[in-house]
Image (tube, helix red, strand yellow):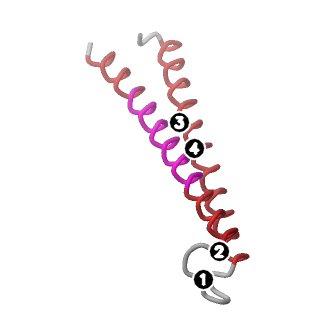
Amino acid sequence: MLTVAQIGFAQAVQEGKAAKKEMKAEKKVAKARELRENARTGKGLEIAGVSDPKTRMAKADRKMEKAAKKELKGEAKELKAVAKEKTKKAAGVD
């Protein structure tokens, strides 16, 4: 009984982690869009050579790359949960 509860809990934890990664990715995408829009419109404080539009766009691009990476990590967590479940079924631990 305890092992069945642990399996269910472990899978729930993996799914929770996946959901958290996806939420973080969405947050990063929103921030990247905001940074890109600010760079385009010149909104906010601008310091020559430090926060010119090109530098600000580069920052937005890096943020977008990190968001894509978070999305991949979320998908990996989901796949890991499914793999764990299938492994447990194959081992007959149901």
Q: Which mark is residue 73?
A: 4
- Where in the figure is residue 67, as x and y percent of width and height? 60, 52
Give the magenta-colored segment's residue range. Answer: 12-30
Name the residue rendered at 62%, 57% in the picture.
33
**Residue ID for mark 2:** 42
- How many angstroms separate mark 2 from mark 1 (CA)? 8 Å
Distance between the alpha carbons at the discs numbered 3 and 4: 6 Å
Q: Residue at x 68, y 81 (%)?
A: 52
Q: Nearer the viewer, mark 4 or mark 1?
A: 1
**Predominant secondary structure, magenta span:** helix
Q: Residues at badges 2 and 1 in contact (C-beta under 8 Å)?
A: yes
Sort mark 3 into few (<14), some (14-19) or many (20+) by Cα contacts within 10 Å.
many
In the depicted structure, whether residue 11 falls above or below residue 68 = above
Q: Amino acid at mark 3?
A: Lys
Which residue in the structure is indicated by mark 1? 46
Q: Answer left or right for 59 relative to 94.
A: right
Where residue 84 sits: x, y (%)?
A: 50, 25
Pick out the residue farthest to the left. Answer: 2
Q: How many marks?
A: 4
- Residue 90 belongs to magenta span: no
Quarter of the image for residue 5 reads: top left
